[in-house]
Image: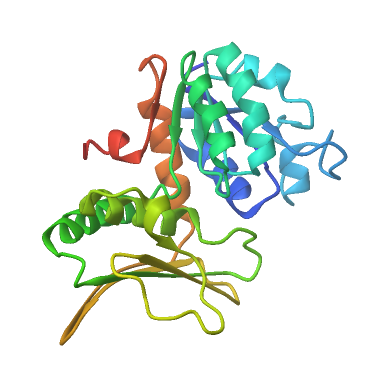
Amino acid sequence: MAGTGIVVMGASGRMGRMLCDLVQRSEATRLVGVTEAPGHPWAGRDLGEVMGGAPTGVPVTDDPIEVVARAQAVIDFTTPAATVAMTELTAQARAVHVIGTTGLTPEDIAVIERAGDHATIVRAGNMSLGVNLLTQVVAQVAAALDADYDIEIVEAHHRHKVDAPSGTALMLGEAAARGRGVALDAVADRGRDGMTGARARGAIGFHAIRGGDVIGEHDVIFAADGERITLRHQATDRSVFARGALKAALWGQGKGPGCFDMLDVLGLK
């Protein structure tokens, strides 16, 4: 069969549904499997039927071993635990693993990076073209301005988001820290409450807003005495993330083992 075989993890989620639709509509791909967590009510049923349409012949499975073995790529916007578990399967299958999961710990990332010794992994906190361009701009601005310019990152998402700061906010923070020539962990200030004292010079602050159906908004503020520079990205359609993930899955074909990000996919490095 023509087209790159794709497995979508977490088919019932907002991103999962969108990815399933996009993969099935693309002439470059075919949907070879979809997964859900064990015990999920969709497990064992036809994807098309549970999504309210005609049967597709693609069953939802809670055991990904068989479908991953038939895939050239796995697209994964799920949970840290599910993503880490999937890395073993994608490494064995030598399938491209596209990871949009956020909330990963340093230990999770270490496991993912070890899997990159055997398979192609593309991991990004945000897969939109605009955000990845913004990270480049943030790094350049941070490099041009000294610590007289305080850096604050403000992000807003829907009420259901479970991690904070967002993966995108951390990407932007990493870019700012890289521009300043420092490690983000050494300068990050992730919360202020009560008598916190004056702002530390050189800190990179993070603030998370949760409410309604906000898809994603991120501001990087460079504030000095007398002026303020704000760099902003607003996502108005979740499909920008799905299209970026699909682009990454296709880009990774034939690349060989390694850990990459969307800057690699977009040729921005």
Residue 141 percent across, percent down from the top left: 17, 61
Task: Give the residue at x 35% y 28%.
Answer: 251
Residue occupying the far left of the picture: 144
Quarter where residue 230 is shown: bottom left
Closest to the observer, 21 or 173: 173
Residue 32 percent across, percent down from the top left: 62, 25
Residue 1 percent across, percent down from the top left: 53, 15
Which quadrant is the C terminus positioned in? top left
State whether residue 66 appears in this view.
yes
**Left-right relation of 66 to 190:** right
Residue occupying the far bottom of the picture: 226
Coloring scheme used: rainbow
Task: Give the residue at x 39% y 53%.
Answer: 186
269 to 92, vertically: above or below: below
State whether residue 24 appears in this view.
no
Task: Give the residue at x 38% y 80%.
Answer: 198
